[in-house]
Structure formats: C-alpha cells, structure tokens
Image (tube, rainbow, N blue to C red):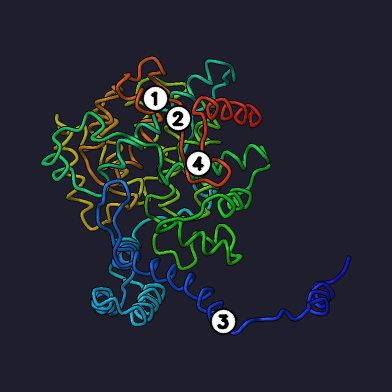
Amino acid sequence: MKKAWELAREMYVEGVPVYQADDNQTIWEDNASGPEKAQDELIKMYWHSQVPGSRAHESITLASIQAIENRGYIVDDGLEIYKRGLKAFEENDMVELHKITFDLFNAVNEARKNEESDYWNQTFYDSFEDYAKVVTFPEKIELAYDEEMTRKNHAGWLAQIIGGAYGTCIEGYTGESIAERYGFVDRYIRKPNTYNDDITYELALLLAYKEFGKKTTALDIAREWVARVPMGWSAEDFALRNLKAGILPPESGKFHNAFNEWIGAQMRGAICGQLYPGNPYKAAECAWMDASISHARNGILGEVFNAIMTSLAYVETDIRKIVTTAIELMPEDSEYGQVVRFALEQCKKHDYYYDAWMKCEEKYIKYNWIHAYPNAAAEVVALWYGEGDFTKTLAMCGGCGQDVDCNAAQIMTVIGIIVGLDNIPNYWKEPIGDELDTYVRGLKKMSIKQLAEMTTEVAKTLVE
C-alpha cells in the first residue's frame, strides 16, 4: 500500500493548470461568503435563539456561565463579557461578536473552583463500576421477544413521539406561564409533527446496537452521531465538535463542555430500557456508556434514571413502584440522587401535583430550564400524580413547564409500555399516525411500527 506522502505527491504531479478567466475574484467571493454566513449565524444563535417548536428564548453564552457555576466554579468577569457581547449582537458587529464569543467561552473554560459551593459536598461517580458498587439492582426477569414485546415497543415509541410532539409546543416556559396562556394542557395545542432533536440520538444508539450487538461501545454510538446527526445543542453541540476533532468518549463529554449536567443525556435514556427490558442493570450500563459521549457525573445519572424506569415498565405496572425503585438506584450521596429524593418527598407531602412542583421549582431556581435537575423533579412529580393515566401524566408534565418535550417523551415511553397501544387515547394517536419524520441522515422517514419491530429484533440479540 502506498504511503500518504506518495498519494499526496501523485495528486500534486498529476494536476494540470486550469485556464481561468478574468472573473476569478467571483470564485473567491462565492467560496468565502457561504462559510462566513454560516459561522455568523451560528455565533448569533449562541447569543440569542428561539426554540423552533415553542419560540422560547435561550442564550447559550449566558447559560454557559450559569451551567459552570452550577458545577461549583466562578467565571471571572463572565457577566461583564456577556454584556459586551450583547451590545455587539444588538449592533450586528460580527467582528466584535466573534472576538467576544471567544473571550466568553475561554473564561468559562478557565473558570476557577468555588471552594464554598455546595456542589463539592457530594460523591462523584466517574465510572459505571463505581456507581454499580453502591446500589443493588433488582434481578433481571426473562421475557419473550415476541409479538407482545413488539406491541409494547410500539406503544412505547408512539407514546414517546406523542410526548415530544405535545411538549415541543410549550417547552422553555414556566408552568405558570403555560397555564395562563393555555390552561391545563390535556391536548395538542396545535397540529402536531414528529420532528424533534431528542429522538435523533436514540435512533443513533439503536443503529449502533443493530450493527455491533453486545460488542457495541461508546465509540460505535459516537460514530453514528457524527454520521447521522447534523446539528446539536448545548452539551451535544460541544460533544459533536469534540468528536469531529478526534476527542473520543468519555473525554468528548468532558472537554470544554459546560453543559454536561444538562438534560441532553437524560432525554435519551428510554431506548436503553427498551433494549434491555426487565433488566435494569444492563439498561443502566447501556445508558452510562451512551451518556458518556456528551455528559459526565450527574448528567450521566439522568440517562441512567430514565433507562431504569423504562426497563422496569416491561415487568411492573405500578408506576409509583417504578419511580420509587429508580430513585433508590440513584446514589444518595450524589446531587442527582438528592434531587429525585427531594421531589419524591414533596409528592408524599402534598395532595396536589402543582404544590409539590412549586417546592421543586423553588429549590432548583438557580438551574436553567434545560438542566437535568429541575426536569428530573418534573418527571417524578408527573409520574407520581399521574398514577399511570396517559392523559393526566402528560398534562401534569406540561403543567410543570421546563423542558417539556424531553420530559414528556421519556416518561410517556414508560406509560405507553405499561398501558399498551389500545389504551392510548385516539385523540393522541390519530394525529401522529404511523410516520416518523426526522432529520437523521438515512432515516428521514420511518414507520413507527417498523421502528418497534427493529427495537425488538435488536433487543433479542442482546439477551445473555
């Protein structure tokens, strides 16, 4: 085989000069204008963007300061840099905005440890092995990978898609704002569609497991990310950039990633439970591996939490028992474990779901609406008070506000598996039908039923 230098030399030697007309300047201008515009638009999105489905406002630059401070650091001059950036943004001074964006992310990456932060008063779990040592998993239950399993998977996927379609219209707002505008949201507030960024990562994982089976690694899943996911947000955006630069898991989730305890891993745990039904240990292990691509520590525990609940849904119909078991499997000395336990305590203290939720919202007020913590609390509240009822659970999830599509998609997968296809109300099912539209390369359109069949087939290959 020829060496790289030989191939490069051939390309050079075989080149034939191309005659160029006097309008060569146009070629330069055309080649430069496209990348410049794309880069400018991306940088502006970091300073101000609106969620596609709900038009809620978000600023990744401001949120990066918030996120790293939540993790026990201090960003010197962070807000001063942010204010300068806002001025450049408002004046559309792109040269200055690029410089200030550089300054701000550098300041975040160089943040100094806040020795007084409560964040450091917890135990950190940096590997699945360390985590698994401190919890006791239920024994796995053997299941048949038959038509009934496929029907459960179909119900789970359909419920997840319903939850995403419902939630994407109201994500990024407080429960109070949603109630003032729409009341108790027990319906679609507009014609639903199935486009959602959350499901893309679950499909990538499923495809990796389809190809590699029991031998699947985080690297295999990451390769599907870079091949099939054209864009990300917050933790996934930074992880994708790391991956494309050759920074592999788990460093891809840690390196210069302020958002690695946000919701991005928590929002994709359900598929791990679907691949390991009735086997919460293996579901948790799968979730840990997947989460490490873009997250760390408590961010990883978020995906593990949802994976466990989904796995248990195949063998347990009491939703409160599922929630309680999953919470018991979150280490008590981790912040994440403390969050879900606090939420459960509020559920047991209050008769009305919103009263319990307001206690959670007040306690976690310092966290962004895309952070794992307030959303984990919202999941617990909605599942506890929803009592297994499809519409009530979904509406209560919406009533909590926060990152509603992520939360609803995950917890409704659990509910869908429990209640089954026939018990999902038609007014939720019929507008969705059987077609799933995504922006995943190679999977732009899918049959939800066929997706369920694929899930069962892949899960069957993982049985030990």
* Between marks 1 and 3 in the image, the one whose residue lies nearer the viewer: 3
As measured in the structure, the alpha-carbon distance from the residue carrying label 4 to the one carrying label 3 is 48 Å
Residue 178 coordinates in the image, percent (x, y): 17, 42
Q: Is residue 191 left or right of residue 418?
A: left
Do labels 1 and 2 touch, CB within 8 Å?
yes
Q: Amino acid at mark 4?
A: Glu
As measured in the structure, the alpha-carbon distance from the residue carrying label 1 to the one carrying label 4 is 17 Å
- The one of 397 and 123 positioned closer to us in this rendering: 397
Do labels 1 and 4 touch, CB within 8 Å?
no
Compare marks 4 and 3 and give the one earlier in the sequence: 3
For image coordinates 51% across by 59% down, the residue present is 240
Compare marks 1 and 4 and give the one earlier in the sequence: 4
For image coordinates 25% across by 49% down, the residue present is 172
* Between marks 4 and 3 in the image, the one whose residue lies nearer the viewer: 3
Q: Is residue 245 left or right of residue 338?
A: right
Q: Which mark is residue 416?
A: 1
* Residue identified by numbered label 4: 202
As measured in the structure, the alpha-carbon distance from the residue carrying label 4 to the one carrying label 2 is 11 Å
Residue 115 coordinates in the image, percent (x, y): 32, 71
Q: Amino acid at mark 1?
A: Gly
* Residue identified by numbered label 2: 157
Compare marks 1 and 2 and give the one earlier in the sequence: 2
* Between marks 2 and 3 in the image, the one whose residue lies nearer the viewer: 3
* Residue identified by numbered label 3: 23
Report which quarter residue 75 is drawn in.
bottom left
Q: Amino acid at mark 2?
A: Trp
Residue 61 coordinates in the image, percent (x, y): 32, 68
